[in-house]
Amino acid sequence: MRLLTLLFFYLSFIGAANAQFRGKVFLDKNKNKLAESTEQGMPGVAVSDGQNVTRTDKDGNYSLPGNSKTRFIFITLPSGYKLTDKHYIKAEATIKAYNFGIIEDPTSAGASVKMLQITDTETDKYNDWIVNVKDYAKKQGISFIVHTGDICYEKGLNFHANQITSETMGKQIFYCIGNHDLVKGAYGEELFENLFGPVYYSFDAGPAHFIITPMRSGDFQPSYTVDEVISWMRNDLAAVDKNKPVIIFNHDLLTYNDQFILKGKNDSINLNDNNLKAWVYGHWHNNFVRKSENTGIHYISTAPPDKGGIDNSAGQFLSIEIDKNGVKEVKPHYTYLHKHLVVNTPSGTDMVKVKNGALIINANVYDSETTVKSVKSIIYNTKGNKVAETTLTANTDWNWGGEIPVAKLEKGKSLTIQTEVTFADGEHHIQKQAFTIAADVAKTALKWVSNIKGNIWKTAPLFAQGRLFAATIDDGNNINCGITALDPQSGKILWRYKTHNSIKHEMAYDGGLILCTDMEGFTYALKASSGQLFWKKNLGMKSLPGYISAGVAENGIYYTGAEGYFQALDVKTGKTIWVNKEWRGGEGTPEKMTIAGDVIITGSNWQSLFGHDKKTGKLLWKRSDEGLRFRSSTGKYINDKLYITGLNSIFVIDPKTGKTLQKIDADYEFKVMATPLVTDKYIVMPTAKHGVVAYDINTLKQAWNRTTDNALVYSAPYAGPESATVECSVIRYKNKLLFGASDGFLYVLDENSGNIIRKINLGAPVFADLSVVDNTVYVGDFAGNVFAISNI
């Protein structure tokens, strides 16, 4: 059977090589997909047979010679138009004319164009994220959607071909082929071609030229070669205005370097010479956008929209706006949220803050399918009369804040705050809740809340030199990323420092300096007192994944970096003391390094857990067995033992040798960014899907499990709907257990039973660990708020 199949394709190729492919590109005014004599031909449109590229004549007609591998004739859709059928027609002997109908599309015209990127969906199940993408595209004037690959295996490919199409989504959708889309068949891309057409092609939209390119290799061998792709691409680009920005899509990043040179066995092409402005990709399941300082080229990657990323990145899709200069704006959009609104202050009696004679209002608002246009709050007294009103101001993509003079409000009596949200799609959402301003406002639990104008991922508030430090990410434009110093008593912002890229994980303090490393591998040493840059060092990160781990400082040495740029730095000078030369590879690793005596513990996700001599950097041991290669969590060093998790187990390890001393095998997934809490009674560990679990320290038997509500944003690897995720470590405070959760609540539990003593609704996921200083708990949420809460 396989021999007959190969013979069929061979004969098809012979026929194609001798064929002359003719057709017409026409304005399909009646949208019936048929070229009729009354319908206008479209001149100057590029059409290809997979190698040769030609343009239609003044009447929209074209002719192509074909080649030995011609399987499709496909069109380069011009700006300002969309197709009435597919962008390709399969080459068959029975077809006499390869005609393409197009109609005008205002979203594809103009000085700029907006698109959506989704990637690595790897599913054959329908879920709300699909509706989110569809409705966002419809409501926000999106021109097209690109899926950058890993649709995933036969079931996923067939599901997407039926459920996520231009017809079902209401927008043109273009697919890249990923490594898991090369499946068993006569050749690796056979099924993909049957469902989605050619694996490389191009189209125009707005001011730009867009090119879909295939994965170099995958699970099964493709029939195409890189040389063939280069040959076609050269012909394609030759037909493009040299001033047009070029945007390329692929499942993986071609290079982390400045020079985008696609190399085959016998041929190559330098894409920098062809006005390349962005390379948009997936594959790594992470949120990472960077722009080369030398070339201006953007490198754009997103996690999947349906689940958390491999490195615990938040599940999302991207909107990307392109203008004549290239990438104008990149915005993340988190899925599964519909008209979400939580006013975290004022709320009840404790979460109320009066500052400088004004009632502070803080609201976390989000919707996956639209943007927020405006937010206002109205205060009513006990009689239902309106006594005050204010318009809130946006702080981040999640957060809005405002103030109302407290002189207008009665103290000691129940008041109602009504918050009204107007969304860009014209819909409105209203929420009411009661609160009371205490006679003595200084005694409320909420000491202050301050928004630091960027999202907070895993950077716990850091207390040093009488100041509180927090750090932010910007997974779109690298504008709102940096370090902020606050007054721990009032929340007043003392200084800010803008970093080159996102600070994903915790900072360190040593010798009067705040130390951290951003996602591009730049390490910063800032004076804690002023925010002045003391030194900055490029660690030499030369490849993916982006740096999302946390370094640690001890006795004048800062340990930071990963793979070949994992190193020890002199805190005073930034000079390298030693650098790792013994291992490379792996995925993004959201764990903080652990100092365990004379050993520095680090890891590489999907690779290994490592123990290095902290003085020399020498590798002492590594573990990749029993799920330890899945590196999300941070270790806890106590009593000469290292407590750390693998995928479904908690290990007690000798840090000197790496050998297992004790082990708990569990029914939970521990692929979260948290650290085990070890007390005299329990080992307490957050989970990816079932909240928090506690084990008896002596018997290692489960003592209790406290589930949370479902996550607002999914972050744990491959975790999606119905996941009660906790990324924040549990801390012990006054015989109580405290943690923030992805459902947006701050939890206070009884240590012995796991029963909930108190829940505070903050309204945004809490990924970062909590900090406690002088009976005050400091919490950073994903919306960019830092809360100071006492009396817990």
Image: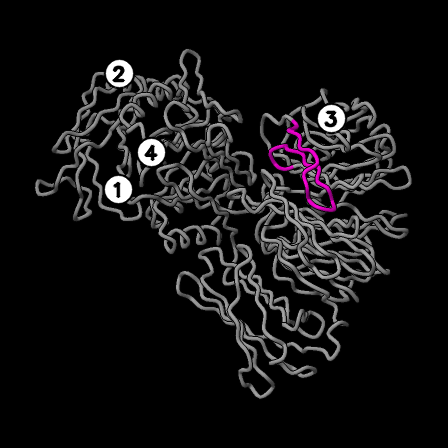
Question: Which circle's residue, 1 or 4, is located before the other in the chain?
Answer: 1
Rendered location of residue 529, percent (x, y): 74, 46
Rendered location of residue 38, percent (x, y): 8, 43
Question: Which circle's residue, 3 or 1, is located before the other in the chain?
Answer: 1
Q: Which residue is label 3 attached to?
A: 575
Q: Nearer the viewer, residue 188 or 781?
A: 781
Rendered location of residue 407, percent (x, y): 63, 79
Question: Which circle's residue, 2 or 4, is located before the other in the chain?
Answer: 2
Task: Kindly report which numbered mark, 3 or 2, lies closer to the viewer in this rendering.
Answer: 3
Check residue 222 in the rendering and tell me which mark sits there, or answer none.
none
Q: Which residue is label 1 attached to?
A: 83
- 385 to 164, vertically: above or below: below
Amino acid type, callout 4: His
Q: SS at mark 1? A: strand
Task: Kindly report which numbered mark, 3 or 4, lies closer to the viewer in this rendering.
Answer: 3
For residue 170: magenta? no
Quadrant of the snapshot with the C terminus: bottom right
Residue drawn at (81%, 24%), measured in percent from left and top? 620
Amino acid type, callout 1: Leu
- Residues in magenta? 518-539
Rendered location of residue 696, percent (x, y): 86, 51
Figure quadrant of residue 763: bottom right
